[in-house]
Image: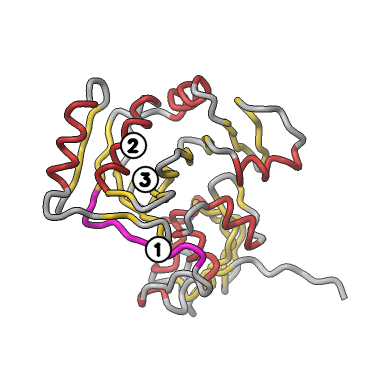
Amino acid sequence: MRRTRFAAKGVAATLVATLAVAVAAGAVTLDPEHYYCFPIGASAIPVQTLSAAAAERDFTVLNTSDNTVSILHGIQTPSDNVQGMLDSASRLLVLDSDHFYLRSAGHLVTYAIRPAAAGYELVVSPATSVDLEEALTSVLMDVQDLGVLRMDIDLDSGRSFARNALKGPAEPLDLAGKLDYVLYGLTVSEDWFVYAHAKGLALLGLDIEVVAEKLPGETSPAAFSAYVVSESSQAAELILPIEQLVALAQSNAVGYVRLPYVPVAP
């Protein structure tokens, strides 16, 4: 398995060499019609430290708590324009408890670091055709300035997705009929906030409200009990971290995970 690791502080000279070795099997070109997701392991920086570093570099920094959003750094704006900041801020950091979502747009690539099933993942969106080594070097040099001390990029587990695909990404076979396709699309979307806005999904920070329909005779999986808001014998309503949607749908006790039904006035 090819991985590239780096430790911040004096990384500039060794980083390029490490990447060159990691992709030595052959040059890989990223194309602007796709975006790419790479697992990167756990974060090695506390969110408050990251928040301070991001503010110093003029990131828009938002904090979510109790379903409200506060602006820690950035241009003060009416609350109804927060969605605009989530959609279009070129350098964005969203804090949600001890998790974060970071996005930065550059001339070469736009990248995001966001929670994943196992730690975090790096999403790379190239602006033009670019060599993988050059793209990752650009990203890693940028996050070094934010104080990210360690990143373990799993190149072999990377996935690519077509931008602007009419039908969206196809669900894996083990999720067919188990997870609403809009929710699956959210988990692998290029940008969670832009996708949610386009699909009319109401995110609660880095969480989303969903309903898990239980199989007959089953109870809610214990691993997700902390997220349960209400429950009946047939279903459970949860406010769940986005990165946990797939795991919930894969649970043996769950038949289907969907969005809550919205009552329609007669």
Measure the C-alpha gap from mark 2 to mark 3: 18 Å
According to the image, label 1 marks what residue?
A: 161
Q: Is residue 211 visible?
A: yes
Q: How many marks?
A: 3
Q: In this view, does 55 lie above or below 191?
A: above
The label nearer to you, 3 versus 1, is 1
Q: Can residue 100 be seen in this view?
A: no
Which residue is depicted at the point 30% across and 45% down?
40
Q: In this view, does 150 lie above or below 162?
A: above
Left or right: 193 as drawn, with respect to 243: right
Residue 224 image offset from top left, x and y in percent: 46, 56
What's under tag 2, amino acid-wise? Ser
What's under tag 3, amino acid-wise? Tyr
**In terms of sequence position, does the residue under pointer 2 or pointer 3 come before the other?**
3
Q: Which quarter of the rendering shows the N terminus?
A: bottom left
Asked whether 34 or 117 is in front, the reply is 34
Q: Is residue 123 magenta?
A: no
According to the image, label 3 marks what residue?
A: 120
Quadrant of residue 174 in the image?
bottom left
Which residue is depicted at the point 46% across and 60% down?
245
**In terms of sequence position, does the residue under pointer 1 or pointer 2 come before the other?**
2
Measure the C-alpha gap from mark 1 to mark 2: 21 Å
Magenta span covers which residues? 154-164
Left or right: 198 as drawn, with respect to 107: right
Measure the C-alpha gap from mark 3 to mark 1: 18 Å
Q: Is mark 1 on a helix, strand or loop?
A: strand
Q: Is mark 3 on a helix, strand or loop?
A: strand
Q: Which quarter of the rendering shows the C terminus?
A: bottom right
Q: Are marks 3 and 1 in contact (CB under 8 Å)?
A: no
